[in-house]
Amino acid sequence: MSTMNSEVYDALISAGADETKAREAAKSVAQYDSDVGDIKTSLADIKASLRVIQWMFGFTLAFVVALTWRTFQ
């Protein structure tokens, strides 16, 4: 069951829109808001994974530099 943004619905009705069209428009706005929230959550997960990968790369690079330095000294 879809939720409906009542503020959008009321604004459309007061602007003179048809009741069924206003209801469907309000439902689509609510669905859009839900989709944006899902995208933000996914983006936060990707950013967290990227931070871990950056730390792993930094550690590996430091280890390789240290081994190279020790080998040629």
Image (spheres, helix red, strand yellow):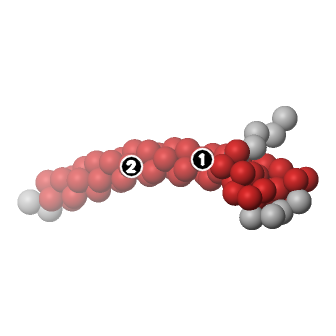
Earlier in the chain: of badge 2 and badge 1, it is 1
Left or right of 34 on screen, residue 18: right
Q: Residue at x 75, y 43 (%)?
A: 4
**Residue that lies at the very extreme toward the top in this rendered image:** 1
Query: How many marks can you see?
Result: 2
Q: Residue at x 83, y 50 (%)?
A: 23
Q: Residue at x 40, y 45 (%)?
A: 52
Q: Position of residue 48 (x, y in %)?
A: 44, 45
Q: Position of residue 38 (x, y in %)?
A: 63, 46
Q: CA distance from mark 2 to mark 1?
A: 21 Å
Q: Nearest to the eye among marks 2 and 1: give it.
A: 1
Residue 68 can be seen in this image: yes
Q: Nearer the viewer, residue 15 or 33?
A: 15
Q: Which mark is residue 2?
A: none
Left or right of 9 on screen, residue 23: right
Q: Quadrant of residue 3?
A: top right
Q: In the structure shown, which secondary structural element does the residue marked by tag 1 occupy?
A: helix
Q: Residue at x 72, y 51 (%)?
A: 10
Q: Position of residue 28 (x, y in %)?
A: 78, 54
**Mark 1: few, some, or many residues within 10 Å (few <14, many ≥20)?**
few
Q: Position of residue 42 (x, y in %)?
A: 58, 47
Q: Quadrant of residue 73?
A: bottom left
Residue 32 can be seen in this image: no
**Disc 2 residue type?**
Arg
**Mark 2: few, some, or many residues within 10 Å (few <14, many ≥20)?**
few
Q: In the structure shown, which secondary structural element does the residue marked by tag 2 occupy?
A: helix
Quadrant, the N terminus: top right
**Disc 1 residue type?**
Gly
**Residue that lies at the very extreme toward the left in this rendered image:** 73
- Identify residue for label 1: 37
- Identify residue for label 2: 51
Q: Are marks 2 and 1 in contact (CB under 8 Å)?
A: no
